[in-house]
Image (cartoon, rainbow, N blue to C red):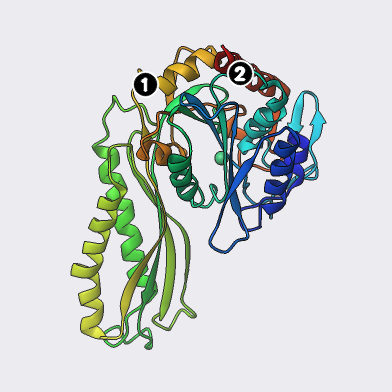
């Protein structure tokens, strides 16, 4: 099953419909009706299905179907052909996160005697900001009977994860005014303005780092503000007309990323833009939000966490710095835990792999869940 799922190159920029059609046909062959929740453009789809009776007390297994690109990465095998070497299975998406979905699908034939259901929820566009999940979650919430728990199968090495940071991803587009670089009183360099705003991000992060609580379980134990890409300017002696840069803010659960954005916008509108426009009124700063993924934070005694501990045989819980769809499920009122096979250390890397040992652990987890839901 993993070989099959990996063979679909479902990079987030591409359609995932062939994979979805395969899963739909496979489930139909097992007598299970699956439902699609399409993207606006129709090129992508989420899928959900109920295995077993349509009763309360079900467990939702959540996975994303998309994977990150392989361009520019030095792969030693074909990323879309599952390749085994010394107990490791190589391929894009093996660990993040087709293995979890593959295990669930492969065990569908063993789910014949369920008394309470197991639901599958497969999303698109997780890797570019969890864009597909909200409509899937909305639909599931209105269509499925009340559920007991959601297990988000992101790679956690089968450890039980109860928290992740949020992600706020936005673009800043500075429009300056061109002049000779010696005539600073007549021009507004978009690059220099961008530099000032990027510096604001750095200073804000430094303040967070200084105020970090030693008790915080996250690594690093503070919210981060980062600029990952900058484009701007045309020559050393022209004040740049355009500069764009992208920002990624990851807050601790409990901190609202929107408050950082509001602070940033206030700095732009009240301090920076007026200074730009005093020199040239046609200058401006535009901010566009691309993704806003809520953080995830649940207490240890919630049902989903207890269930994940029981099924994985783990006693400890932990939090992780990478974000997933868990916060979105939590925000919608579900009881959620994160637990899936594979290590995040191999995710998004060239030569991504999952060990057969992790696949087996994931399979044991799933078989215990089937047993529990059948008793
Ligand atoms: Zn993932």
Picture quadrant where residue 237 is located? bottom left
Residue 323 appears in the picture as rendered: no
Q: Secondary structure at mark 2?
A: helix
Q: Position of residue 26 (x, y in %)?
A: 74, 38
Q: Position of residue 145 (x, y in %)?
A: 46, 32
Q: As rendered, which of 123 and 80 lies closer to the eye?
A: 123
Residue 30 appears in the picture as rendered: yes
Q: Position of residue 360 (x, y in %)?
A: 69, 19
Q: Position of residue 184 (x, y in %)?
A: 30, 83
Dot 2 or dot 1: first in sequence order is: 1
What residue lies at 73% left-to-right and 34% top-to-bottom?
Answer: 2
Q: Secondary structure at mark 1?
A: loop
**Residue beneath disc 1:** 302
**Residue beneath disc 2:** 370
**On the rendered structure, is 354 left or right of 229?**
right
Q: Is label 2 or label 1 in front? A: 2
Question: In which quadrant will I find the C terminus?
Answer: top right
Q: CA distance from mark 2 to mark 1?
A: 20 Å
């Amino acid at each position: 099953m993993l070989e099959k799922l990996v063979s679909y190159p479902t990079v987030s920029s591409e359609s995932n419909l062939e994979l979805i059609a395969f899963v739909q046909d496979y489930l139909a062959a097992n007598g299970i009706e699956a439902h699609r929740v399409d993207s606006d453009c129709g090129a992508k789809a989420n899928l959900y299905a109920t295995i077993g009776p349509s009763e309360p007390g079900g467990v939702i297994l959540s996975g994303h179907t998309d994977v990150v690109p392989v361009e520019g990465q030095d792969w030693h095998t074909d990323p879309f052909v599952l390749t085994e070497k010394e107990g490791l299975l190589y391929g894009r998406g093996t660990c993040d996160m087709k293995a979890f979905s593959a295990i669930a699908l492969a065990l569908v034939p063993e789910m014949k005697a369920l008394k309470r259901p197991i639901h599958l929820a497969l999303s698109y566009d997780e890797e570019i900001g969890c864009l597909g999940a909200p409509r899937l979650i909305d639909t599931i919430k209105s269509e499925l009977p009340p559920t007991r728990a959601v297990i988000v199968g992101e790679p956690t090495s089968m450890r039980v994860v109860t928290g992740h940071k949020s992600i706020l991803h936005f673009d800043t587009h500075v429009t300056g005014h061109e002049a000779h670089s010696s005539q600073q009183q007549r021009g507004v360099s978009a690059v220099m303005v961008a530099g000032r705003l990027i510096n604001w991000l750095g200073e804000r992060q430094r303040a967070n780092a200084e105020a970090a609580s030693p008790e915080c379980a996250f690594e690093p134990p503070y919210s981060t503000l980062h600029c990952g890409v900058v484009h701007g300017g045309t020559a050393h002696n022209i004040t740049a007309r355009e500069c764009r840069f992208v920002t990624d803010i990851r807050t601790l659960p409990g901190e609202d990323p929107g408050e950082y954005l509001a602070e940033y916008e206030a700095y732009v509108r009240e301090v920076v833009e007026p200074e730009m426009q005093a020199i040239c009124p046609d200058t401006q700063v535009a901010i566009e939000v691309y993704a806003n993924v809520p953080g995830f934070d649940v207490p240890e005694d919630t049902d989903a966490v207890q269930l994940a501990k029981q099924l994985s045989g783990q006693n400890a819980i932990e939090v992780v710095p990478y974000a997933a769809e868990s916060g979105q499920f939590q925000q919608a009122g579900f009881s959620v835990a994160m637990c899936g096979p594979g290590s995040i250390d191999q995710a998004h890397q060239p030569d991504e792999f999952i060990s057969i040992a992790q696949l087996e652990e994931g399979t044991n987890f799933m078989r215990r869940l089937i047993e529990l839901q059948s008793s």
